[in-house]
Structure formats: structure tokens, C-alpha cells
Amino acid sequence: MKLRILKSAVTNPWFNLATEDWIFQELDPGSHTLFLWRNSETVVIGRTQNPWVECKINKMEEDGIYLARRQSGGGAVFHDLGNTNFTFLSPKDDYNQDANFTIIVNALKKLGIDATQSGRNDMHVGERKISGSAFKHASDRSFHHGTLLVNANMQKLGDYLNPHPLKLKAKGIKSVRSRVANLIEFNPDINHEMLSDAIIEAFCEYYGQQVEVEELDEASLSKQPHLNKYYQQMADWDWRFGKTPQFSHHIETRFDWGIIDLHLDVQQAIIKDVVIFSDALNVELIDALKQTLTDTKYTIDEVKAKLEALKNNQPDMANQIDDFEKWLIGEMTT
């Protein structure tokens, strides 16, 4: 199968996230594609997160920090030039998430670092987290995005992010910084270029092919109209901050699969606007819940009937929908 390797020479996060979208939407789904990139100082939030809750917006504006919203799910992260980001695109029928992690683990081994996959999303060295991932799937392709902490400024994680109290309580964490580590702690010579070269080498070795690396820069926007379209979306204020409706019912909780921060605008006993902020990785679940509740009568029977129907139509998400239904119905009865 054909391989393709892209590497960004740009550190503008809107360009790099737009390139991810362009790769996912436009590139040949019949090939395995690797994209390597890094951002200037940026807070990147998940597609369904609330920037006003996750970030210290005023301080970010004072310090010239970018805010970016990615298309995939998951929580808020801080990027700087000490982060190396990787993106894998594969045909859906040949997608192997473990293979992607194996490539990164093999690359780190080349640099004398013994990393392991931890759970579904993370990689650790010992007990310290050095990488997190998020995922997205379409009918014919699958997408895996991850970040590696190379020499990131750990202090700024706390400067610009607001750790969610529900998540901290659930995990018993006293400090976000205590859980993570930079790769430079395990190899003091490592840098972005060295790591990128190792990942490219491991990618080619895994698939048994050699391929030229394609460099991307701002000139690519004029050469690729679709890429420019995605860039304009990523840079747009409405995409990054969104329009905030006047909420009349606000409840939140934490499930094993993510935090749910639910806002319902009810007009004349009809749910007219639904906003769900979440760090859940399954963006399709959040979209389905919003669509299901919108224009539903604000009664227990109607809400329950709609969510039961959604469970029947989406068996792969039935457990999460059931969790949400029991919680919401419980809140409506109190």
C-alpha cells in the first residue's frame, strides 16, 4: 500500500490543524499517511469543549497565546515548540491503532527511550505520561492524532489551563504537572528534528517502504484551495469560541468515558438549544446527543423516549447513552 509523509515547516496552529483536516477530508484514503508538526505557544481544545471553562482566556490574550479548536474529541492541552505532534491517516479497513503506537514506541527506542502504551490513549515512560492521543473515523478512513512532550514548558500547563475539578476529584490528582514528563528527561540530546527523523524511519520500516518527505509551508495555502478553506475555518473566531446561548438549565457530571457539561435552553417547554461541552473522545456521541435532544419536549417521558430510540439506532454507543439518560432523567426528577 502507498505511503505518504508530510512535515510542516509552519508553527501556526491554525495552519497545522487545517492541514490535519485537509489530510482527513481530501487525501487518498487508500494510503497510509504520516504528518509531523509542532505549534507555537497554543492552547488546543477538543471539538466539544468550552474555552471559557478550559482556558484562562484573558491571560492568553495578554501573553499572545493562540487558541485553537481541533475537530477531534478529548481534553485541552498546551502546545509549544517543545511538543512534537504526529498524525496517522489510514484506510478504515486497514486501520490498526496498535500499529501507530508501535511506530512511535519503535522511534523512541531508536533514541534510547523505553516507552509503553498505557490504556487506549496514552504512552508512558515508567509512571510518567509522555504522550496522549485522540481519534476520528469516517466511512472509508481513520485518523489518529497524538502529541509527544519533548521539551515542553510544564509551568505553562498551569498558567493557561484550568484543570476541571470533577476530573481532579475522580483521579485524586494534586498536580497536573506531576503526572507528565518531557522526553528530554530520558535523553538530554533529543529535539524535534531528531524525533521526527526517528518517527519517519520507524514508519518506513514498519511498512517496508521508503518515501520522500513532503515539506509544507504557507505557500501551500495558495497551491491547495481546500487547505486554505480549512485554514480560514480554524482561524475563525466563531469556530474557536462559538456563540454562547442564554442557558436556562446547566448541569454537569463525570462518567468513566468523560466529563459532560450540559446546557439546555428551554422555550415554551421545548428544548430549543443544546450545548454539550465535553472531553469525551467520541465526538459522534456528543453530536448524537445534541441532535436527539434539540426540539424535544422538556418532559421526562419525551426525553427518555428520544434517548431510548437513539440507543436502539446506535448500539455501539448504547452504554454511554444509557449512562447519560439515567443521569439526565435523575436530574430532571430532582
Image: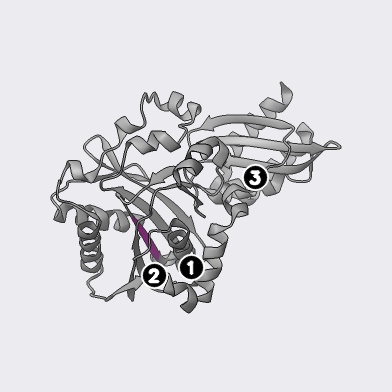
The stretch in magenta equals 85-89
Q: Residues within 10 Å of mark 1 (few under 14, many from 20)?
A: some
Tag 3's secondary structure?
A: helix
Looking at the rendering, in which quadrant would you find the C terminus?
top right
Please say if 323 is above or below 146.
above
State the residue at coordinates (57%, 61%): 233
Q: Quadrant of residue 211?
A: bottom left
Mark 3 or 2: in front is 2
Check contact, mark 2 vs mark 1: CB within 8 A: no
Location of mark 3 (residue): 289
Amino acid on which the number 2 mark rests in the picture: Asp
Amino acid on which the number 3 mark rests in the picture: Leu
Q: Earlier in the sequence, mark 3 or mark 2?
A: 2
State the residue at coordinates (26%, 46%): 151
State the residue at coordinates (37%, 26%): 173
Location of mark 1 (residue): 22
State the residue at coordinates (40%, 57%): 144
Q: Earlier in the sequence, mark 2 or mark 1?
A: 1
Q: Quadrant of residue 329?
A: top right
Mark 2 or 1: in front is 2
Q: Is residue 327 magenta?
A: no
How far across and how far down the image is residue 40, in percent?
A: 38, 53
Let me know if residue 195 appears in the view. Answer: yes
Please say if 53 is above or below 8.
above
Disc number for residue 63: none
How many badges with numbers are in the image?
A: 3
Location of mark 2 (residue): 217
Query: Label 3 vs label 2: CA separation?
Result: 38 Å
